[in-house]
Amino acid sequence: MFAFVAVPISAAVRFATHPLSQQLFGGRLEEATTGGYVTFWWIVALGLLATPLLIGWGVAKMSRNTLAVIAVIVGVFFLAVMILGQLFVF
């Protein structure tokens, strides 16, 4: 699973560690604050890094409760990224 998210993780870390890459996106993202931009990409990178661990844990447990916990964690992560995206990006 990690092989599938390795490229997006490296891209997110690259955007987070090089704030000047903010200019590559243009438009409203270019106008966002540097701190918001970096924070957004670090949260995305950490979420992507946690994905293989979360899926591995879910497969190992394979119970209804575990799948519900995974669904809640993914939902909260998705909402956090959407909210941060709206606050810092748009």
Image (cartoon, grey):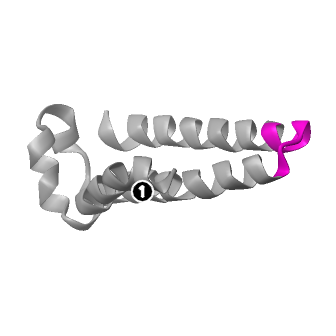
Q: In this view, does 68 lie above or below 34?
A: above
The residue pinned by badge 1 equals 45
Magenta segment's dominant SS is: helix
Judge whether residue 62 is colored magenta: yes
Find the residue positioned furthest to the bottom: 17
Percent across and percent down for residue 66 are 84, 44
Q: Is residue 85 above or below residue 61?
A: above
Front-most of residues 16 and 64: 64
65 horizontally vs 77: left or right: right
- Mark 1 lies on a secondary structure that is helix
Q: Position of residue 64 (x, y in %)?
A: 89, 36
Name which residue lies at 62% across and 58% down: 53
Return the x and y of residue 33 as percentages of the image width and height. 26, 52
Which image quadrant for residue 90?
top left
Q: Is residue 43 magenta?
A: no
Region in magenta: 61-67
Count of numbered circles in the view: 1
Give me the residue at 58% from left, 43% from top.
Answer: 77
Of residues 67 and 35, the one nearer the viewer is 67
**Image position of 55 (left or right of 51):** right
Q: Which residue is drawn at 20% across and 34% down?
A: 28
Tell me the residue at 14%/54% (across/down): 21
> To which quarter of the image does residue 50 belong?
bottom right
Mark 1, other Cα within 10 Å: few <14 / some 14–19 / many ≥20: many
Q: Position of residue 37 (x, y in %)?
A: 30, 52
Q: Please, what is the three-letter code of the amino acid marked with disc 1?
A: Ala
* Residue nearest the observer in this picture, 43 or 36: 43
Between 4 and 35, the one lying in front of the other is 4
